[in-house]
Amino acid sequence: MEEQVKAALENVRPNLQADGGDVEFVSVNEDGIVSVRLTGKCGHCPMSHMTLKMGIESYLKKEIPQVKEVVRVE
């Protein structure tokens, strides 16, 4: 599943980079919890929680049904 998540993140990365941010894969566990790090402008944007949940998480869940949640780590 790790390779699937990494590939899916490559599809959302251009949208984040267009706004000066980025996403970095950290890990995925056997329960389907994906950990990512938001960097650049996304790292401290007040809308980053919405980007994480409504953007990244919803896309990953749609592409990879085994993904249950995406969480942010520092």
Image (cartoon, grey):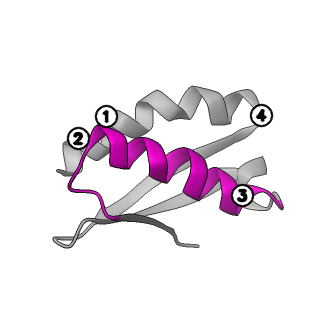
Which label's residue is closer to the chain start, 4 or 2? 2
Give how far across and how far down residue 43 sits, in percent.
Answer: 71, 59
Q: Amino acid at mark 3?
A: Ser
Query: What is the CA distance from the residue labelled 2 to the residue labelled 3?
Result: 23 Å
For the residues carrying marks 1 and 3, which lies nearer the camera in this image? 3
Q: Residues within 10 Å of mark 4 (few under 14, many from 20)?
A: few
Q: Is residue 63 located in the magenta-colored stretch of the structure?
A: yes
Q: Nearer the viewer, residue 25 or 69?
A: 69
Q: Nearer the viewer, residue 72 or 69?
A: 69
Residue 44: quarter of image: bottom right
CB-based contact (under 8 Å), mark 1 and mark 2? yes
Query: In the structure shown, which secondary structural element does the residue marked by tag 4 occupy?
Result: loop
Which label's residue is closer to the chain start, 4 or 1? 1
Q: Which residue is mark 3?
A: 48
Give how far across and how far down residue 25 sits, in percent.
Answer: 41, 53
Q: Amino acid at mark 2?
A: Gln
Q: Is residue 13 located in the magenta-colored stretch of the structure?
A: no
Q: Residue at x 71, y 57 (%)?
A: 48
Query: What is the CA distance from the residue labelled 1 to the residue labelled 2?
Result: 5 Å
Q: Residues within 10 Å of mark 1 (few under 14, many from 20)?
A: few
Q: Amino acid at mark 4?
A: Asp
Q: Amino acid at mark 1?
A: Ala
User: In the picture shown, does residue 7 fall above or below 40?
Assistant: above
Q: Which residue is mark 1?
A: 7
Q: Nearer the viewer, residue 59 or 1?
A: 59
Q: Which residues are magenta?
A: 46-68
**7 left or right, relative to 35:** left
Q: Which residue is mark 4?
A: 19
**52 left or right, relative to 20:** left
